[in-house]
Image (cartoon, helix red, strand yellow):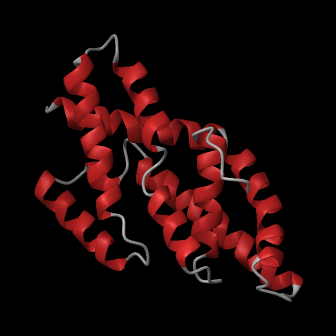
Amino acid sequence: MNPVRVLLRAYYERLHERMEAQRAELIARIGMLLPAEIEARRFGPLRPDQVQAYHEACVAFIDERLETYNPIGIQYTFDHATSRGAAELEFQLDWYTSRAEFESLVSVARALVDQDGLSDENLSALVDELIRRVGAYPDRSILAGYAEKPTLQKLPDFLVASAIEAVVCDRSMNGR
C-alpha cells in the first residue's frame, strides 16, 4: 500500500482512538460551549428543550465522527473507486467546503513521508506530527465556514469541531 495512504489511515485510527477515549470530555466541553455560544451569537432566547436538542445533536455528531474515523468502519469495506465516489458526494452535501483542507492534509502527509520515510518505528510519531500540524479533518473547514456566517444550523458542527480541536488535538480554539 502507498505510504501516504498508510499514514492517513493511521491518522484516522489515532483520531478515533483519542475521540473514543475522550468522548465524555468532548461531551462535557460541548455542554460548556453550547450556552456560551448561544449567548455570544445572540441565537436566543432558546427554551431548555431546544438547548437540549442542540446538545443531543452535538452528541450525535460526535458519534458520527467516531464512525467516520473508525478503522474498521464501513468506509474501509469498499474499494478505492467507491471510497472516492463517497468522498465526492460528501464534498457536495456538506455546508462547508473541505476539499482544499483534504488536499492540504494529503500534502502534509506526503511531505512527512518524503522527509522521514515511513516505517513501523516512526509511524506513530508521524501520525502525531500530522495531527499537530493539521488537526482533525474537516475541522478547519467547519470552523471557517461557521466564522464566515454563524447560524443555528451550523452550531452543532461548529461545537463538535471546536471540542475535537481542543480536547483530541490539544489545540487552542482562539479564545473560545
Residue under the point 58% across and 43% down: 19
Task: Give left or right: position of 164 versus 13.
Answer: right
Relative height, residue 73 to residue 45 (above, below):
above
Q: Position of residue 142 (x, y in %)?
A: 50, 66
Q: Position of residue 116 (x, y in %)?
A: 26, 17
Q: Position of residue 6 (x, y in %)?
A: 25, 32
Task: Give left or right: position of 36 versus 135.
Answer: right
Residue under the point 63% across and 56% down: 162
Residue under the point 34% across and 15% down: 122
**Splitting the image into 4 quarters, where does residue 22 fall?**
top right
Position of the C terminus, as image quadrant, is bottom right
Q: Position of residue 53 (x, y in %)?
A: 74, 79
Task: Give left or right: position of 63 versus 55.
Answer: left
Residue at the extreme top of the image, as rendered: 121
Q: How many marks?
A: 0
**Splitting the image into 4 quarters, where does residue 106 fall?**
top left
Relative height, residue 59 to residue 7 (above, below):
below
Q: Which of 6/73 is in front? A: 6
Position of the N terminus, as image quadrant, is top left
Task: Give left or right: position of 135 versus 61.
Answer: left
